[in-house]
Amino acid sequence: MSKVWFFTGSSRGLGRSFAEAALARGDKVAAAARSRASLDELVATYGDAVLPLQLDVTDRVAVFEGVNRAKERFGRLDVVVNNAGTGLFGAVEELTEQQLRDQLETNLFGALRVVQAALPASPMAPASNAGEPTVKMS
């Protein structure tokens, strides 16, 4: 049975590779990225099997709207992969508090928002006792 995936950070790197792998095996993918244009090649290659979503995980409204669009399009979400994230490099004493807050907003709270939006109406919801795991990557 094919699965429906929701990926954040689908524009490049692991998120893109995982989305392509899911699509290549015949699954459906909601691919989210800050830039919709970065997903055009996926749409050209896989057509209706991919739903390109422009969203920034730091925007709660955009996350919930994106997840809802994916649920409307595909009817469910089987697997959620929180891949969106930022890296922060430097000596801890050189990092500003704002840099750290910005990173937490994306890497921690962004992932939390996606799970909050996706979990209630998915097979992963606790009441169903079925489904696939939610995957958090960093």
Image: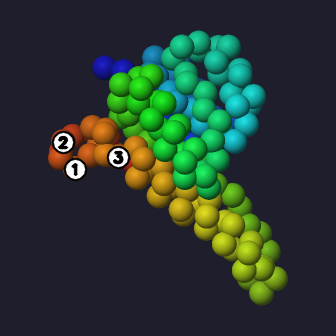
Q: Amino acid at mark 3?
A: Leu
Instruction: Where is residue 42? Give x, y as percent.
Output: 65, 22
Mark 2 residue crowding within 10 angstroms, few (<14) / some (14–19) / many (20+): few
The answer to whether mark 2 and mark 1 are in CB contact below 8 A is yes
Quote the CA–CA distance across marks 2 and 3. 11 Å
User: Who's the residue at 22% across and 50% down the image?
Assistant: 126
User: Who's the residue at 46% across and 17% down the image?
Assistant: 26
Describe the element under mark 1 as helix, strand or loop: helix
Left or right: 132 as drawn, with respect to 126: right
Where 32 falls versus 119 (above or below)? above
Mark 3 residue crowding within 10 angstroms, few (<14) / some (14–19) / many (20+): some
Instruction: Where is residue 94? Give x, y as percent.
Output: 82, 82
Q: Is residue 14 visible?
A: no
Answer with mark 2 or mark 3, whichever residue precedes in sequence. Answer: 3
Instruction: Where is residue 120? Give x, y as percent.
Output: 31, 45
In the image, farthest residue toward the front: 61
Describe the element under mark 3 as helix, strand or loop: loop
- Please name the residue that numbered disc 2 is placed on: 128
Q: Quadrant of residue 118?
A: top left
Answer with mark 3 or mark 1, whichever residue precedes in sequence. Answer: 3
- Please name the residue that numbered disc 3 is placed on: 119
Quote the CA–CA distance across marks 3 and 1. 9 Å
Left or right: 18 as drawn, with respect to 45: left
Q: Quadrant of residue 39?
A: top right
Q: Amino acid at mark 1?
A: Pro
- Please name the residue that numbered disc 1 is placed on: 126
